[in-house]
C-alpha cells in the first residue's frame, strides 16, 4: 500500500516464524551520479551513493548501531548499482527496531568532521574490492561492455573520487532521493501489518514530492571491446563472458526474465549437453554459473567461472550460441527447464531476505512478485525461442579474464 | 511448529528429524564424521565429490543432473567441513515440498540419497575412472582457488602455522599433493571405511514423512555392530608467539592473529566463550569495531571469532601495510582491557542480545538448523537453540573476564602489499 506520506509499505506475513526481516530502500544507487533535481542538473563524485549509506548511520544523538544494540537486532545496509537498502532482522523488540530504522533514514547528520573520518574506512573497503578477483573480473567486464552508461563505474568509487565528497553533496543527494515518494519499506516474517502501519504513523515525517530525473547517456548497442584482462595474484584464472543486448529503455518484465531463466537452464544448465561438454574438456568446474544482469539502460547475460583456459571456454560457448540460434531449444529441454525454474521460484520464498529483495526491486521496476508463478505456467516453447532472438548475440559479447602472471 | 526426533539406528549412526511445515523446500543430509588424518582426509573429500556425480542407477553426471532437474530442480551436493580435529563429509539433498507439485519429490529424493551413499557407481571394487579424474581435477581447482580470496588464504596460513604438527592443520580436504596422489583404490577404501567406522549423522528437515528415508538408512545400517573411531582433541597453550609474513601485489595488507583459547565440550561453556569473543569483536558495537575501525579509521573490518571445537580464537583485519603494527597494538590493547575487566553492562547486554538473536533466527532456516545440529555433535551435550538462548542470559561478567584471560596469542600472520 502507499501511505499518505508517500512511502510504499509492503508487508509479507510468514506465520510461525521467529524472526522478522525489515528493509527500507530508496531508488538511488551508484548509477544515479548525474540527475536533474527541481530542474537543476547535478553531477556527483563516483561513490557518493555508497558514502551516503555509510554516513546515514550517524545522527545527532549518536550512531544507529548503538541504538540497535539495545534491541538485539542485526542491522546492515548495502548500496547496489540502482538502489540503497537499510535493513535489520530481529527476533524480539520489533517495533523499537523499526522505529530506529525509520529514524535513521529520516535524520541525516553530515558534518565536515564525520564525513572526513569515513575516508579511511571506505578507503579500506575500496582497497579490499581492488584485491578481490571476483569483483574485478565483473567490473572489467562491465567496462568492456558499456561505453558511457554509469554501470561501468565502481559502486564505491575510488580513493580519489571519494576525497571530493562533502557534507553539501551528501545533503543534495539526500534531498533528491531520500524522499518518501521514492522509497519502499518491506517487512517479511512474523509481523502484523496493522502494527507496522501504526509504527510508521507514529514515526514518519511526511515529505513533499520532489522532481528528480536520472540522466543516462545514450548507450550504443555494440560492446566496447571483445576481450579484457587483468593480472592479479590468483592461482586459477577467472572469467566472465557477457552478452550485451538492447536495453529497450525500460526494465525487463517478469515474463522476459523467466523466459531467459528457462532458456539459460536448457542451454547451459547442469543437465545440458553443453555443460557436460565443457566439463569433459576440463573448461569449467562447479563454480560455473550464469545470471541475467539488467536495469535501467543496461541488459546482459553473464556467465562466469574459474577455468585454466578462459579463451577455450568462451570459444566453446560462443560456438554453441551460434548453433542455438539456428536450432532453438528443443521441446524436451524446454519442459524440464521449466520445471527447474518453477521449483527455484517457489523455493526462493523460503528466504526472508530474498522475498524482501524481490519486493523492493519489484516495486522499483514494476515487476509483480506473485505473477511470476503464473507466468511460468503459461510459458510456451515459442515464447522462449522468440526471446532468444534478442539475446545471446555472439557478435556482441566481451570476455573478461583475471589471471596470474 | 517444529518437532525434533532423534533415533539411534545403530552404534554411531543417528537419525534426526525436524518436522516442520513452514517451509517450501525439504532438506536431507548425511554427515560422515571421522578423525582428521593425513592418510584419509583427501580421499574422504574426493569421495564426497565422486559420490554426488553419479550412482548405479544414474551412471553418469548428465543422467543424474537430468533426474534432479525433473524433480523440479532438486539439488544434491557434497560439502566438507572441519569440526575441531574431526573431518565431516556431508552429502546434502534438497527439493521442493510435496504440496507444490503433483508427484512426491521427497520420497524420490530420499531414495536418491540412499542410492548415492550405498549403491555408488562401483565395479570390481573401483569407482569409474572418468568420475575420479573429473572430480580430482575440480577438487584441485577448488583447493588452488582458495588463494584467490586473500582473506581466507591468510586465515588458512595462520592456522597451518599455529597448528603445525597437529591433525587440525591437515584441514578439511588434506593437501594438494595428497589429492594428486590418490588412487581409485584409495577412494573405494575411504567409502568402505566411512560407512563402517565414521560417526554418521542423518538429518531430515521439512514437512515430509521421515519414514521413507529412515527405512532406507535402516536397511543399510541395520543393527550391525560398528566400531567408531574416537580421538581426544588436542588443545595447547602457546610457548612463544610465532610470526610469519608474506608479500604479494596487493592494495591492502591482511593481518591475522591466531590465539589459543579455552577448550570445552559442554555447550554452556562454549556459549560463554563465544560471548567473550562477541564482546571483543563480533558486532558493530564491539570493542574492536568501535575502536580499531570507528575511532582510529584503520580498517573496514576487524573481527574476532572462536572455534569452540578446538579452543582457538582468530582476529583478522584488512589494513594499509604501514599500519599493520599500529593495528596489532590497537587490537591487543582492546583484548587487555577485556582481560582486566574493563567492560560495561551495556557491552555485555548488547552482545547477549546479538547472540540470542542469531540463535533464535537459526530456527527459521532449514540449512542453519542442519549446520547447528551437525556442528554440535561432538559436544558432550547439545542444547536446542532456544535452550542455548536461555543459557546465554545467565553468563556473568566474571565468567567473560575469566575466559578472556585464557586467550593467549600464538601466531601472527601478515600478508603485505609490495612496495
Image (cartoon, rainbow, N blue to C red):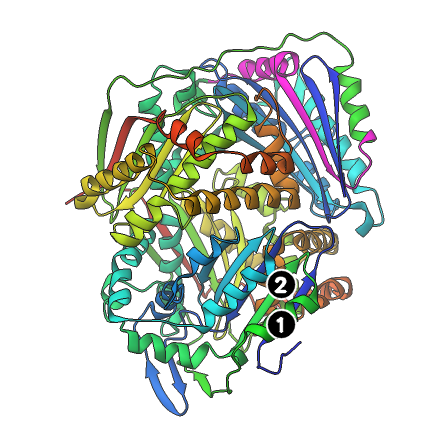
Task: Locate the N terminus of chain B and report the quarter of the image it occupies.
Answer: top right
Q: Are marks 2 and 1 on the same chain?
A: yes
Q: Residue B16's spot in the image, x, y percent?
A: 72, 28
Residue located 55% across and 73% down the image = A203
Asked if the residue under mark 1 is in contact with the one under mark 2, i.e. CB atoms within 8 Å, the reply is: yes
From which residue to which does the magenta span run? Answer: B182-211
- The residue that disc 1 covers is A9
In this rendered view, identify the residue nearer to me: A123 or A381.
A123
Q: Is residue B191 visible?
A: yes
Residue located 19% across and 45% down the image = B323
Q: Residue A387's spot in the image, x, y percent?
A: 63, 68
Placement of B365 over or under A30, stated as above or below: above
Residue B87 is one of the magenta-drawn residues: no
Residue located 38% across and 53% down the image = A135
- How many numbered circles are shown? 2
- The residue that disc 2 covers is A187
Q: Is residue B141 visible?
A: no
In this rendered view, identify the residue nearer to me: A91 or B184.
A91
Amino acid at each position: 500500500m502507499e501511505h499518505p506520506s508517500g512511502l510504499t509499505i509492503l508487508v509479507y506475513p510468514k506465520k510461525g516464524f521467529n524472526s522478522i526481516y525489515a528493509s527500507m530502500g530508496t531508488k538511488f544507487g551508484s548509477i544515479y551520479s548525474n540527475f536533474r533535481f527541481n530542474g537543476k542538473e547535478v553531477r556527483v563524485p563516483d561513490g557518493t551513493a555508497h558514502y551516503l549509506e555509510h554516513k546515514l548511520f550517524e545522527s545527532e544523538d549518536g550512531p544507529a548501531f548503538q541504538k540497535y544494540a539495545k534491541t538485539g537486532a542485526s542491522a546492515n545496509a548495502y548500496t547496489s548499482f540502482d538502489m540503497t537498502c537499510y535493513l535489520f532482522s530481529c527476533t524480539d523488540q520489533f517495533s523499537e527496531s523499526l522505529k530506529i530504522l525509520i529514524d535513521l533514514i529520516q535524520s541525516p547528520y553530515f558534518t565536515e568532521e564525520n564525513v572526513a573520518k569515513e575516508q579511511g574506512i571506505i578507503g579500506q573497503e575500496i582497497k579490499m574490492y581492488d584485491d578481490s578477483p571476483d569483483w574485478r573480473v565483473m567490473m572489467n567486464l562491465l567496462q568492456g561492455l558499456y561505453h558511457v552508461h554509469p554501470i561501468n563505474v565502481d559502486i564505491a568509487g575510488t580513493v580519489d573520487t571519494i576525497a571530493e565528497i562533502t557534507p553539501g553533496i551528501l545533503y543534495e543527494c539526500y534531498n533528491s532521493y531520500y524522499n518518501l515518494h521514492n522509497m519502499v519499506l518491506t517487512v517479511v516474517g512474523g509481523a502484523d501489518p496493522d502494527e507496522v502501519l501504526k509504527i510508521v504513523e507514529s514515526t514518519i515525517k511526511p515529505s513533499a514530492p520532489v522532481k528528480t530525473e536520472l540522466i543516462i547517456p545514450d548507450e550504443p548497442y555494440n560492446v566496447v571491446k571483445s576481450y579484457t584482462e587483468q593480472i592479479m595474484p590468483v592461482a586459477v584464472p577467472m572469467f566472465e563472458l557477457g552478452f550485451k543486448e538492447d536495453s529497450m529503455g525500460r526494465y525487463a518484465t517478469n515474463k522476459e526474465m523467466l523466459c531467459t531463466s528457462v532458456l539459460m537452464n536448457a542451454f547451459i544448465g547442469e543437465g545440458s549437453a553443453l555443460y557436460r561438454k565443457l566439463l569433459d574438456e576440463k573448461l569449467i568446474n562447479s563454480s560455473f554459473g550464469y545470471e541475467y544482469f539488467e536495469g535501467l539502460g543496461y541488459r546482459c547475460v553473464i556467465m562466469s567461472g574459474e577455468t585454466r583456459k578462459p579463451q577455450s571456454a568462451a570459444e566453446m560457448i560462443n560456438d554453441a550460441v551460434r548453433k542455438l540460434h539456428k536450432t532453438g531449444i528443443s521441446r524436451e529441454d524446454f519442459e524440464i527447464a521449466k520445471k527447474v525454474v518453477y521449483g527455484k521460484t517457489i523455493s526462493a520464498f523460503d528466504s526472508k531476505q530474498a522475498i524482501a529483495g524481490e519486493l523492493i526491486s519489484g516495486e522499483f521496476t514494476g515487476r509483480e512478485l506473485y505473477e511470476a508463478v503464473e507466468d511460468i505456467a503459461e510459458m510456451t516453447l515459442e515464447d522462449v525461442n522468440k526471446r532468444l532472438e534478442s539475446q545471446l548475440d555472439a557478435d556482441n559479447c566481451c570476455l573478461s579474464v583475471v589471471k596470474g602472471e | 511448529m517444529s518437532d525434533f526426533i532423534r533415533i539411534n539406528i545403530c552404534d554411531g549412526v543417528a537419525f534426526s528429524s525436524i518436522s516442520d511445515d513452514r517451509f517450501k523446500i525439504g532438506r536431507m543430509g548425511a554427515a560422515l564424521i571421522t578423525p582428521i588424518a593425513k592418510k584419509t582426509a583427501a580421499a574422504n573429500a574426493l569421495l564426497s565429490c565422486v559420490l554426488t556425480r553419479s550412482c548405479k542407477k544414474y551412471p553418469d553426471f548428465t543422467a543424474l543432473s537430468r533426474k534432479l532437474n525433473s524433480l523440479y530442480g532438486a539439488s544434491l551436493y557434497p560439502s566438507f567441513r572441519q569440526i575441531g580435529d574431526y573431518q565431516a563429509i556431508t552429502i546434502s539433498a534438497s527439493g521442493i515440498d510435496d504440496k507444490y507439485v503433483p508427484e512426491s519429490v521427497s520420497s524420490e529424493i530420499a531414495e536418491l540419497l540412499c542410492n548415492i551413499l550405498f549403491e555408488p557407481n562401483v565395479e570390481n571394487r573401483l569407482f569409474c575412472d572418468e568420475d575420479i579424474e573429473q572430480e580430482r581435477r575440480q577438487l584441485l581447482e577448488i583447493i588452488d582457488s582458495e588463494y584467490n580470496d586473500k582473506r581466507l588464504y591468510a586465515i588458512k596460513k595462520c592456522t597451518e602455522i599455529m597448528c603445525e604438527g597437529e591433525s587440525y592443520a591437515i584441514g578439511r580436504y588434506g593437501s594438494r599433493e595428497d589429492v594428486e596422489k590418490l588412487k581409485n583404490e584409495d577412494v573405494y577404501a575411504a567409502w568402505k571405511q566411512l560407512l563402517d567406522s565414521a560417526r554418521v549423522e542423518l538429518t531430515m528437515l521439512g514437512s515430509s514423512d521421515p519414514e521413507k528415508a529412515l527405512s532406507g538408512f535402516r536397511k543399510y545400517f541395520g543393527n550391525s555392530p560398528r566400531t567408531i573411531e574416537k580421538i581426544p582433541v588436542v588443545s595447547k597453550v602457546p610457548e612463544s608467539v610465532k610470526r610469519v609474513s608474506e608479500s604479494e601485489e596487493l592494495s591492502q595488507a591482511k593481518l591475522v592473529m591466531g590465539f589459543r583459547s579455552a577448550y570445552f565440550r559442554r555447550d554452556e561453556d562454549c556459549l560463554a566463550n563465544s560471548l567473550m569473543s562477541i564482546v571483543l569483536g563480533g558486532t558493530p558495537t564491539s570493542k574492536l569495531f568501535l575502536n580499531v575501525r570507528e575511532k582510529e579509521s584503520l580498517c573496514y573490518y576487524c573481527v574476532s571469532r572462536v572455534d569452540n571445537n578446538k579452543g582457538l580464537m582468530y582476529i583478522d583485519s584488512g589494513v594499509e601495510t604501514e599500519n599493520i603494527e599500529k593495528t596489532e597494538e590497537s587490537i591487543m590493547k582492546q583484548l587487555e582491557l577485556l582481560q582486566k575487566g574493563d567492560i560495561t553492562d551495556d557491552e555485555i547486554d548488547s552482545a547477549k542480545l546479538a547472540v540470542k538473536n542469531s540463535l533464535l533466527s537459526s530456527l527459521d532456516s532449514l540449512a542453519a538448523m542442519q549446520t547447528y545440529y551437525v556442528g554440535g555433535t561432538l559436544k558432550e551435550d547439545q542444547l536446542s537453540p532456544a535452550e542455548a538462548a536461555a543459557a546465554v542470559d545467565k553468563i556473568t561478567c566474571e565468567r567473560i573476564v575469566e575466559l578472556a584471560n585464557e586467550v593467549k596469542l600464538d601466531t601472527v600472520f601478515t600478508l603485505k602489499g609490495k612496495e
